[in-house]
Image (spheres, helix red, strand yellow):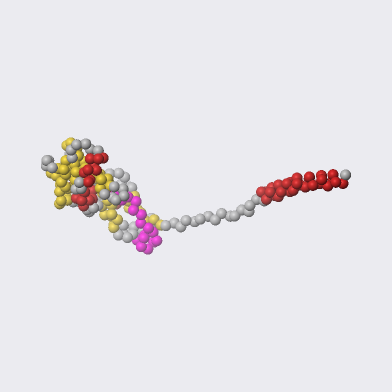
Amino acid sequence: MATANTEAVVATPREGKFNKNAARRVRVAGKIPAVVYGAGQETVAVAVDPKVITRILHSDSGHNTIFDLNVEGSGAVKAMIVDWQHEPIKGKLLHIDLKRIAMDKAMRVSVPIQLVGIPVGVKSQGGILEHVMREVEIECLPGDIPSHLDVDVSNMELHGLIHVSDLPHSGSIKFLGDENATVAHVTIIKEEVVAVEETVAAPTEPEVAKKGKTDAAAGTAAAPAADAKDAKKK
């Protein structure tokens, strides 16, 4: 289930203009800009410690972690990270969206799917395991959100399939989407057969044409010589 982070996230409200220059100043000060919304309350622009957010994102439950969010000047609430942006080159956090969570209301989240074991079709039948669906969308109460869903693939033979319906189900979780969607399958690597095209002899017409052109040119060149010879005889 989703774990509660023991370290509360402290957020400082931001004031003034919210533009690129303001966001840059927040980052220079060692924080990252963020917004807090949800639970029927107004959206608040804040600044948070990127180290704390990074620890949450890298935890077992990742972005599905529920933690205490303490916005200075307001009471603590439960929250989750719902969106984040990284700097493309160095990977530093640039911005995050935090959502207040009502623990008594169901919500939709995507959770990772983990494949457990090595299929029979890989061990002894020459197949390979392809993990097609890596996350699945579910609906449940915040306290019932799993950090991940495990599915045992050990008994999968060649051409075997695992569907969403084969994932662990419980009364507290509702799966959204197609239950017949493929999560993983064992397939075989097919060798590509490259067809060898027969080599066709080049047509002789261009060569003949070239020869004819040469002969014609020779004939044209020979004509003045013949006329000169006849003139000499006369």
User: Would you identify the image quadrant in which residue 25 lies?
Assistant: top left
Residue 147 seen: no
Specify whether 138 is left or right of 70: right
Looking at this view, name the residue that lies furthest to the front: 232
Residue 49 in view (yes/no): yes
Work out whether 121 lies above or below 31.
below
Side of 188 relative to 95 (left or right): right
Q: Residue at x 84, y 44 (%)?
A: 231
x and y percent of residue 171 in the render? Answer: 21, 47
In the image, residue 5 lies in the stretch drawn in magenta = no
Q: Residue furthest bottom?
A: 124
Q: Which residues are magenta?
A: 120-136
Q: Residue at x 21, y 36 (%)?
A: 17
Where is residue 49 shown, x and y percent of the image? Answer: 19, 48
Residue 3's x, y, as percent? 18, 51
Q: What residue is shown at x 68% (from left), y 49% (from top)? A: 210
Residue 115 figure quarter: bottom left
Q: What residue sits 27% from the left and 45% below the top?
A: 85
Q: Is residue 130 magenta?
A: yes
Q: Quadrant of the image for the C terminus?
A: top right
